[in-house]
Image (cartoon, rainbow, N blue to C red):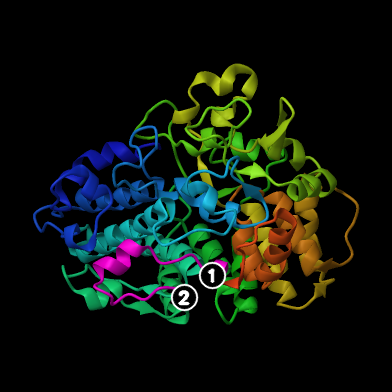
């Protein structure tokens, strides 16, 4: 089903008026004008929906450099998440990528600006599809609407957790409507819209796909939203997790197969890439290499010593799948380009890798189930929570029975289970310990510029400039 770009050939020609392809890929509000002549059939709506996934997938850096305005989609996400946690860092101190792990990200950071634009590209495309839903086959309208709203909610969930208050745009924006495009809306209101969108999606979707929106994906993402919002709804999150747990997903017996047997029984939602095709591949796997460098940079997502220690002590079988020793350098093993290791130069095609990016998998549901049952308390001995927690540990070869789970235990388990999957930053934030953990981490690493303001990324200066001063900056 690696079909994204093929359907996009038609989509790119008609949905937006734009003077060139780069403006289309990274649309400022002024260029995101819909063409009434494009959406005329059910097939056109489907192509529009596929175009939303294309925006998530992003543009491989091997195809276009940062000298042009392009959307990387989720291909830069590890910089904004893993690098800003205590998990990873850049191999060098040079360039804007190295600013994230040292908490020096400024409003003109290229990668942060690109990520913001990518998420709003997803939102703009979803809104376009929703506007022209009346041309779809009536029997498909509910499903198509749910899919578009799921993807819009996904983008807003990323934005609100990284930037705080953000513009909330739920209809096709009128050009130069600066009030709508640039007024930041409070976090609680953004979360309310996310919940509304996911509720609708969960009601109308089924589990046909793993690489497109599904009922289980909407429920699982909604559970995480309910745990993350300012006033968590633990009870409803528990119900949602238990519903997903009844839908036939299971843990892969071998942790390795989670990442290299794609769309397996554990995957609930993943974004697909295709090896060797510059227009369909991803480049982040190559950037995780350092000693035998295959990416454009000197090495990114370099594991920190305390993560290595946690994986070796608490990871069980997961350690060997998560990290590897490359000529004395400990590097990321998850998402090795097409499964190839350094001994054959990562297969010779590392910059055009086909590894899918996993957004939601079953072990996340199980550990969120524990979190929801715990309900913000310090610990739990609830049998259902113990069963979910034990299942994840058993798969890792850690079969000693657990009789009680503390928040620290759960956070540690999530760290070793989801290392390098862009979860750690959001976990620290959701558990309410981000400032304490990262302050201690910054002290250990000598990152003198860390303070609590780093818990939010700065709003890109470009957006503030375009707003004519209407958009405000984070502290």
Q: What stretch is highlighted in magenta?
A: 454-475
Side of 472 where 306 appears, left or right? right
| SS label for mark 2 | helix
Q: Residue at x 63, y 40 (%)?
A: 258
Residue 251 drawn at (x, y percent): 68, 47
Residue 386 drawn at (x, y percent): 81, 63
| SS label for mark 1 | helix
Q: Which residue is drawn at 78% across and 40% down?
A: 317
Residue 455 falls within the magenta-colored stretch = yes
**Crowd rating for badge 2 (residues with CA inside 10 Å; few <14, some 14–19, many 20+):** many
Q: CB under 8 Å between callouts 1 and 2? A: yes
Residue 69 drawn at (x, y percent): 29, 47
Q: Give residue 225's mark.
A: 1
Residue 116 drawn at (x, y percent): 39, 59
Q: Give residue 111's mark.
A: none
Q: What's the CA distance linking mark 1 and mark 2? A: 8 Å
- Up/down of 116 relative to 299, above or below: below
Q: Which residue is drawn at 28% across and 77% down?
A: 470
Side of 122 where 17 appears, left or right? left
Q: Which residue is drawn at 60% across and 38% down?
A: 259
Q: Give residue 191's mark.
A: 2
Q: Quadrant of residue 147?
A: bottom left
Residue nearest the observer in this picture, 374 or 123: 123
Side of 248 where 137 appears, left or right? left
């Amino acid at each position: 089903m690696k079909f994204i770009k093929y359907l996009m050939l038609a989509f790119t020609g008609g949905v937006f008026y734009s003077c060139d392809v780069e403006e289309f890929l990274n649309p400022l509000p002024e260029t995101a004008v819909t063409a009434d002549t494009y959406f005329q059939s059910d097939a056109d709506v489907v192509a529009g929906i596929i175009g939303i996934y294309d925006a998530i997938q992003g543009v491989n850096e091997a195809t276009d450099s940062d000298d042009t305005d392009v959307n990387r989609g989720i291909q830069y996400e590890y910089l904004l998440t893993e690098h800003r946690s205590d998990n990873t860092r850049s191999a060098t101190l040079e360039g804007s990528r190295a600013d994230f792990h040292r908490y020096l990200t400024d409003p003109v950071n290229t990668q942060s600006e690109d990520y913001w634009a990518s998420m709003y590209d997803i939102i703009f495309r979803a809104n376009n599809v929703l506007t022209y839903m009346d041309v779809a086959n009536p029997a498909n309208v509910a499903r198509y609407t749910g899919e578009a709203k799921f993807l819009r909610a996904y983008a807003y969930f990323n934005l609100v957790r990284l930037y705080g208050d953000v513009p909330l745009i739920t209809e096709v924006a009128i050009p130069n409507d600066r009030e709508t495009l640039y007024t930041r809306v409070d976090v609680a209101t953004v979360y309310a819209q996310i919940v509304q969108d996911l509720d609708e999606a969960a009601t109308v979707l089924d589990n046909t796909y793993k690489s497109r929106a599904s009922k289980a994906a909407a429920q699982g993402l909604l559970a995480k939203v309910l745990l993350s919002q300012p006033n968590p709804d633990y009870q409803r999150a528990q119900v949602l997790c238990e519903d997903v747990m009844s839908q036939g997903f299971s843990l892969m017996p071998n942790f390795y197969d989670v990442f290299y047997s794609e769309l397996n029984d554990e995957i609930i939602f993943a974004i697909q890439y295709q090896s060797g095709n510059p227009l369909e591949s991803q480049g982040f796997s190559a950037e995780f290499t350092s000693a035998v460098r295959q990416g454009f940079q000197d090495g990114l997502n370099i594991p920190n010593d305390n993560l290595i220690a946690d994986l070796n002590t608490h990871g069980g079988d997961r350690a060997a799948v998560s990290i590897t020793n490359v000529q004395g350098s400990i590097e990321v093993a998850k998402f090795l380009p097409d499964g190839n290791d350094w001994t054959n130069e990562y297969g010779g095609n590392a910059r055009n890798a086909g590894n899918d990016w996993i957004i939601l998998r079953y072990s996340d549901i199980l550990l969120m189930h524990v979190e929801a049952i715990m309900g913000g308390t310090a610990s739990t001995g609830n049998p259902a929570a113990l069963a979910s927690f034990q299942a994840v540990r058993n798969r890792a070869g850690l079969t000693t029975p657990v009789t009680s789970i503390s928040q620290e235990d759960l956070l540690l388990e999530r760290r070793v289970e989801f290392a390098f999957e862009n979860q750690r930053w959001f976990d620290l934030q959701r558990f309410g310990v981000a400032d304490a953990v990262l302050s201690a981490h910054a002290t250990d690493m000598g990152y003198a510029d860390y303070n609590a303001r780093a818990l939010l990324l700065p709003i890109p200066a470009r957006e503030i400039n375009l707003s004519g001063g209407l958009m405000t900056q984070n502290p």
